Image (tube, helix red, strand yellow):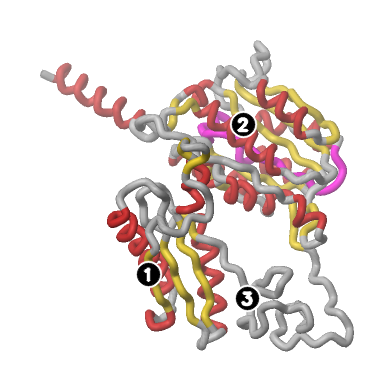
Amino acid sequence: MRRSFFMAFLLIAVGAFFVGCATAPQPLTPFQAYDLNPKVKSGDYTQSVDNFIVVFDGSTSMSDKCQGHKKLDLARETVNRMNQTIPAIKLNGALRTFGQGSCIPGDPTSVIYGPAPYVSADMAKAIAKITCTGGNTPLGEAMEASAAELKAMQGPTAMIIFSDGEATDKAVPAAEALKKEFPGLCIYTVQIGDSKTGKAVLDEVAKAGNCGFATNAKDIMGGAEMAAFVEKVFLTKAAAKPKAVGKLDSDGDGVPDDIDQCPGTPKGAKVDERGCWVIPNVLFDFDKDTVKPQYQGVLDDVVRVLKLNPNVMIQLDGHTDSIGTDQYNMGLSQRRANSVKKYLEKAGIVSGRLTTKAYGESKPIAPNKIDGKDNPAGRAKNRRVELSPVF
């Protein structure tokens, strides 16, 4: 009887261990790299680092699957998407693996790229070499070894760690020691998978760097999300350009009246080169009406501006892609608009300042199909709520 009970308990425990990422295969988020070069060329943004080093987890646990994909493949794809998004700025780069991800027997951590002047194509070739896993997770040892690369780099440096966080050594003390030796280092961690223990480790590693942050790969896989990540790691907003002497700027938005296409900008609103407050669209997952975490910052900024301008109202227009009936999509688009409205109301904006309208699939901003074939990237852009200020 005792043996039967023990075996049953063991089976339950093992099942619980694997349930975290053991879901049916899910397609990867569609990706089209955003071009950040115009922001740099315009002078609006400047590079914030002179160097970066990728620290890549190739340990045995990275062969486990998450959402139907090997974590190693997810990590490699995430690094590739980052590599495609980094603008053409002068950088030095390096790529260090740990575990056996570099397929180098007997070496728990090794450099497979750099340190060298960063070339996107060369980094891509190095990433492609990471094809196998093995060994434990010596994240701390890899960070300690990276001191060799850091000593060869001058100026501010970003260390970006791609790992499931299931470290088997003292990763946090290693991060603290690196920060002490290299004050210009910022540490960023990108978790692959959803291990709570791994998240806790990577959160603390990023925290030890003081100026970096922790995130999860699933939150930066889209083009816009990856662009935001790259912007935070590699770029910084340039100092505001001095206003033209003698030119009137009645609404104080930084754009002189003689070229301002949107006079009367609400106080505190961020404007484009035309002087217009343009609010990014809030995008939704397929057949969902839940506001995703990555768009909360957009809505929080809207709340900030609305609180500074009590007379400004917002029009919320809901949209869908082309999958589903017209009737169903009309209802879905209304629910999406209502979700955004509810978020703003919860943040303190009264209902009377918010108007919603549903358009269903009638107003796409990207093709749902190309040459008769499904276009997932286009459909992803159409699943949106547009926010328009009314004043």
Q: Residues within 10 Å of mark 3 (few under 14, many from 20)?
A: many
Residue type, numbered disc 1: Lys
Q: Is residue 201 visible?
A: no
**How far across and how far down the image is residue 331, in percent?**
30, 60
Count up the numbered dots: 3
Q: Residue at x 48, y 55 (%)?
A: 364
Q: Residues within 10 Å of mark 1 (few under 14, many from 20)?
A: some
The C terminus: image quadrant: bottom right
Mark 1 and mark 2 lie on one chain; the one further toward the N terminus is: 2
Nearest to the eye among marks 1 and 2: give it.
1
Q: Secondary structure at mark 3?
A: loop
**How far across and how far down the image is residue 356, in percent?**
39, 72
| Distance from Cα at disc 2 to Cα at disc 3 | 43 Å
Q: Secondary structure at mark 1?
A: helix
Q: Residue at x 65, y 11 (%)?
A: 105
Q: Secondary structure at mark 2?
A: helix
